Image (cartoon, rainbow, N blue to C red):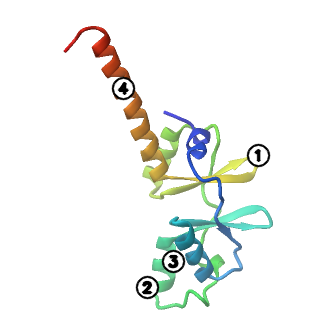
Amino acid sequence: MNTVKNALAQKNAAIVHVRSDEMVFKALQLMRDNRVRSVLVIDDGVLVGIITQGDCAIKVLLPGLDAKESVVSTVMTRNPMTVKLDDPLEACMGLMAARGFRHLPVLDAGKVVGVISIGDVVKDIIREMGHTISFLETYIKGHGVS
């Protein structure tokens, strides 16, 4: 399986983020506009949290709060688990499955360089399966097996 670095190379490099003192409404707008389901929370270049659509639904909408009046810091998950560029995607998949989350911020030398989602991991698995199938087809055809 590939590394986080390989998976990030397949994605848009934009890092979608808000500050912790901004309104949840802004985070939701960014999610909509960028077609993502989470936004990193970065204050002065430091990752302090992550906010997801689920956070907004459960912590803002269900209690009847207003996203335009709710501050990101009250809704976000603080100090999210992170991964490094050289981590294997298989380990990320295990972490996501075991801990029940779908997004992992990626750090390089303490700086945010991207986000890996469960969708990215699935896409990588599908790509790898395609390579394996192609190899096996070539192997079978090359050895006269039908």
The relative height of residue 143 versus residue 105 in the rendered view (above or below) is above
Nearest to N terminus: mark 4 or mark 3: 3
Circle 3: residue type: Cys
Mark linked to residue 93: none
Q: Secondary structure at mark 1?
A: loop
Label 4 vs label 2: CA separation? 48 Å
The amino acid on which the numbered mark 2 sits, given as a three-letter code, is Leu
Separation (CA) of disc 2 from disc 1: 38 Å
Q: Determine the CA span between mark 3 and mark 1.
A: 30 Å
> Which callout, 1 or 4, points to the residue nearer the camera?
4
Q: For this rendering, which residue is in front, 136 or 63? A: 136
Q: Are the residues at dot 2 and dot 3 in contact (C-beta closer than 8 Å)?
A: no
Q: Are marks 4 and 3 in contact (CB under 8 Å)?
A: no
**Residue tagged 2:** 62
Q: Residues within 10 Å of mark 2 (few under 14, many from 20)?
A: few
- Judge by depth and name the residue closer to the eye, 55 or 134: 134
Mark 4 against mark 3, which lies toward the viewer?
Answer: 4
| 88 relative to 16 in the view: left or right | left
Q: Residue at x 65, y 58 (%)?
A: 14
Q: CA distance from mark 2 to mark 3?
A: 9 Å
Residue 134 disc label: 4
Q: Earlier in the sequence, mark 3 or mark 1?
A: 3
Which residue is label 1 attached to?
A: 109
Are there few (<14), some (14-19), or many (20+) residues within 10 Å of tag 4?
few
Q: Mark 3 sits on what residue?
A: 56
Determine the residue positioned at 56% across, 86% down: 67
